[in-house]
Amino acid sequence: MRLTFVNKFHTSRLVLKQFIPSMSLVYTPERFEELKANVGSIQQKVDEVSSGQARLVCVSKLKPASDIQALYDMGYRHFGENYVQELIEKAQALPKDIEWHFIGGLQTNKTKDLAKNITNLYAVETIDTIKKAKKLNDTRANVGGSKIGVFVQVNTSGEEQKSGIFPGEDLTQLVKTILEECPLLELRGLMTIGSYAASYSDGPNAEFGVLADCKQAIESQFGLKDLQLSMGMSGDFVQAIKQGSTSVRVGSSIFGSRPPNNGH
Ligand SMILES: *Cc1c(COP(=O)(O)O)cnc(C)c1O
């Protein structure tokens, strides 16, 4: 009994990981209106709380290309995706002036696909090791193309199993490597994924505070200014903006819920 259950669970996870949604760009008027109402209320809140200063990135992972086309036709340009293959297929099918954000866990061996296949990549937001930074830089150098924007993902919760580099000396060394040894990368800012516990407690989010402090520290150490802060999702983007976020990543509040078990 137990074994059967475990097997089924693993199989469905695998299937979901490889699930690529439809690349048709045709949407229904009903879906257009639904998305318009959803994104409109999120955009309004973002504008209100940030006084028009923060960007909304629509997180479209596992959603059909037609949903993205509908938002594109409303004027939206920044979209976030988590899976390399899905992003490549969507980038090929959809308009070339979309600004794609890769926000998924990045395996070093997939950096080549990102560097090679997507010309309109605004940023890879999940750089958290020196190895990944160098690999992305070197593959871009090999395949040619303009600079790739990057965010350094920071582990602001201190939980060992979470991705992201730790604040302090580790972060400093990674930023130094990007600035000094990666001419094809452009550091755009810092990113974090808030822990569930912190997102659902009231008041200021300690993890967002940590990321804002990291930005101050990095800017003063390297004489940089205007680094972006990518933090905040459907459940906590208002609080994130209050704590300095300039780029929020919102998925389910715009597109509706996703299939279970696909992680972030
Ligand atoms: C899925 C995802 C989001 C969007 O999450 P929602 O809760 O659906 O808004 C934001 N950031 C990352 C890194 C994600 O993986």
Image: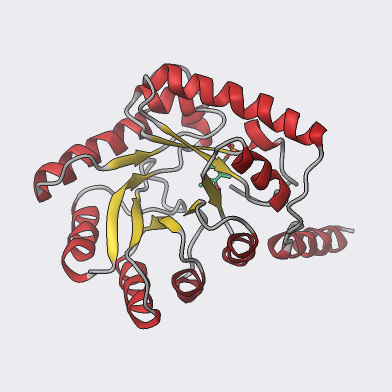
Asked if one can make out residue 95 in the rendered structure from this viewpoint, the answer is yes
Left or right: residue 162 versus residue 138 is right
Asked if one can make out residue 261 in the rendered structure from this viewpoint, the answer is no
Q: Where 162 sits versus 47, above or below?
A: below
- Give the residue at x 80% y 34%: 29
Place of residue 130 in the rendered image (x, y in percent of width and height, measured from the top left): 29, 67
Location of residue 184 (image quadrant): bottom left
Place of residue 248 in the rendered image (x, y in percent of width and height, measured from the top left): 46, 35
- Give the residue at x 44% y 16%: 48
- Give the residue at x 38% y 53%: 164
Place of residue 141 in the rendered image (x, y in percent of width and height, measured from the top left): 32, 78
In the image, ligand 1 is in what quadrant? Answer: top right
Return the residue nearer the eye: 112 or 163. 112
Location of residue 134 (image quadrant): bottom left
Quarter of the picture holding the N terminus: bottom right
Place of residue 45 in the rendered image (x, y in percent of width and height, measured from the top left): 50, 20
Residue found at the very far bottom of the displayed protein: 142
Return the residue nearer the eye: 142 or 207. 142
Location of residue 241 (image quadrant): top left
Q: Where 72 sits versus 12, above or below?
A: above
Q: How is the image coloured?
A: secondary structure
Left or right: residue 247 versus residue 147 is right
Q: Where 248 sits versus 145, above or below?
A: above
Return the residue nearer the eye: 227 or 171. 227
- Give the residue at x 24% y 69%: 182
